[in-house]
Image (cartoon, coloured by chain):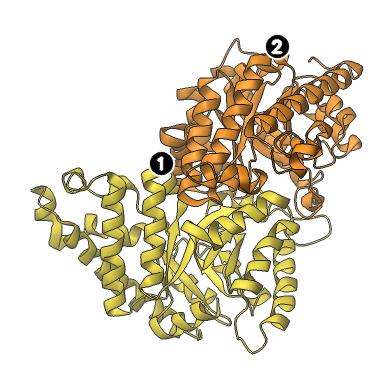
Chain colours: A yellow, B orange
């Protein structure tokens, strides 16, 4: 998480979301590869390579759902995508939103912090209780890993549980946040001298008032900020969330599907003459534009980045 | 879910949990296979075969965490285990506890209801809101699939979120339950003539008072009941939960690790002379004993099963 915070300062706050659904690669391109999953992998690698050349992102986030949906070949593409991200020197965030108890939680920690699916940081779902976070904390201590806990997600359904008011005062998400502050205090002691806790929070950028309140309540927690771009989140809200301890702003479809709205590619698309390189070039342009926009709003909000 | 409810009536309420960690197969047995994951798969198959011969379980539950922890080879064992369960004529429950929004939720539904990892029923985590359940409901309608929503889990951490009191009255889990009742009403209309909704709930068997209250509040919802056996849940509490619409009671380590405590195998274990067949025979004896105990308590509680 420390390394991620530094990368966000150096390269800007953009997190490139490789939520690369197989359907995003046109069939006439995909058929040149051994499988749709292989086409996805090659597209991902082409994006990683370009982003590295321009140093225009803090990290990459890989959403496990799209790879699971491609079955065994998808899991291989998932493993190789994570490896490509890490070998390029970027922090890899695996968006797995796992959450389970006891021995099963241990197994998930092993699954994503070691072996074929090894990553640097995962997202976790706290619903089953705070003890479910323990195995992940252990890997922060022993292997320098980190995790983002779901705090305030960017979808309307956040109102169903996360934002419910508690009898004891505050919202459900405040209880989660208070526990994150507690973990942060504990891990800070273990990671003395590091500015950033190994524990972060997922906070969507779809509501300005929420964003200001959450940033104020958790000044020292680094945020993973989804909802920017395709999901309708606004850069000015990101600017608010990027203050204090900062964060990384994810854009997924806005990047991997950028080619679809890219004026310079419409003729090729109409002629079914697009290439994977065209798509990756377009994704890079989207990254550069997002980086510029985010830095402008972060500066306007007096953010650290 | 209908098929599962019928199987529970016919074969008893036991759900055999194939939470088969690689470490459960002794190294001197595992080394005869191409990989630890392959040894796990063969052990699973040997258990499935025996349970089929005795018809002593309603279904199998496969906990994804243990297979993810074995990497790509583990995912292959996971896919093949699910296939073996379904080819043997049993309902397969994939314990994946997934939960995500929008296109990612769609991808998880595709991942687990089609393709390599196709299963009959999954477990889902509702934390991000009720809209996250929609893609799974669509597969209930179109492909006869089902899902269990986490309602009251069997771990102490259930107190952290699930059991928090809301300002509006009731607990967080009551809000989830109310939504399940609503989905049930909707799907009942679509599945007219079936006794059992495609939507069920996960309710642990670790607290008698909770169990009675939850069974009373959701009389028409079929339960997946974890926590029996190794997790300390008692058969009498299962008896309470098995009333009304009934349910299926999962035992995982109590079955797949039964050989460790099996008096008849201690000499072989001491001599490192155990075989996979010995282990599977012991697992079957544990299944038969669990079935007998559960049926006795279900009958004592006037349950349907």
Is label 2 in a helix, a strand or a loop? helix
Q: How many marks?
A: 2
Residue at left 72%, top 30%? B283
Above or below, B192 relative to A291: above
Above or below, B6 relative to B121: above
Please tell me in which quadrant of the rendered image residue A201 appears.
bottom right
For the C terminus of chain B, the quadrant is top right
Q: Which mark is residue B10?
A: 2
For the N terminus of chain B, the quadrant is top right
In the foreground, A83 or A205:
A83
Above or below, B52 relative to B121: above
Q: Are marks 2 and 1 on the same chain?
A: no
Residue at left 64%, top 80%? A220
Please tell me in which quadrant of the rendered image residue A294 appears.
bottom left
Residue B257, position in %: x, y?
73, 39
In the foreground, B103 or B165:
B103
Residue A34, position in %: x, y?
23, 45
Residue tagged by mark 1? A71
Q: Residue lying furthest front in this view?
A: B271
Q: Which mark is residue A58?
A: none
In the foreground, B39 or A263:
B39
Residue at left 58%, top 82%? A244
Mark 2 and mark 1 in contact? Answer it, CB < 8 Å: no
Residue A193, position in %: x, y?
64, 90
Q: Chain of mark 1?
A: A
- Label 2: few (<14), some or many (≥20) within 10 Å? some
Question: Is residue A195 visible in this depiction of the protein?
Answer: yes
In screen coordinates, is B12 left or right of A229? right
């Amino acid at each position: 998480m420390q390394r991620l915070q530094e990368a966000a300062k150096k390269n800007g706050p953009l997190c490139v979301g490789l939520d690369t659904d197989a359907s995003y690669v046109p069939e006439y391109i995909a058929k040149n590869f051994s499988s749709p999953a292989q086409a996805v992998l090659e597209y991902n690698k082409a994006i990683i390579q370009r982003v590295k050349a321009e140093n225009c992102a803090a990290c990459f986030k890989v959403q496990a759902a799209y790879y699971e949906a491609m079955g065994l070949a998808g899991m291989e593409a998932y493993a190789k995508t994570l490896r490509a991200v890490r070998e390029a020197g970027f922090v890899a965030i695996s968006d797995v939103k796992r959450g389970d108890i006891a021995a099963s939680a241990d197994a998930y920690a092993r699954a994503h912090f070691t072996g074929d699916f090894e990553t640097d940081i995962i997202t976790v779902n706290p619903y089953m209780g705070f003890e479910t976070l323990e195995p992940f904390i252990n890997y922060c201590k022993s292997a320098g890993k980190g995790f983002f806990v779901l705090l305030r997600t960017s979808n309307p359904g956040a109102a169903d549980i996360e934002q419910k008011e508690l009898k004891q005062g505050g919202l459900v998400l405040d209880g989660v946040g208070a526990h994150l502050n507690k973990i942060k205090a504990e891990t800070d002691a273990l990671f003395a001298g590091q500015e950033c806790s190994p524990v972060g929070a997922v906070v969507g950028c779809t509501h300005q008032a929420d964003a200001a309140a959450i940033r104020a309540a958790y000044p020292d927690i680094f945020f993973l900020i989804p909802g920017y771009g395709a999901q309708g989140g606004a850069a000015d809200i990101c600017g608010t969330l990027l203050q204090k301890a900062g964060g990384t702003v994810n854009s997924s479809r806005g990047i991997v599907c950028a080619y679809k709205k890219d004026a310079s590619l419409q003729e090729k698309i109409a002629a079914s003459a697009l290439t994977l390189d065209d798509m990756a070039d377009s994704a890079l342009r989207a990254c550069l534009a997002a980086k510029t926009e985010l830095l402008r709003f972060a500066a306007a909000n007096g953010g650290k980045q």
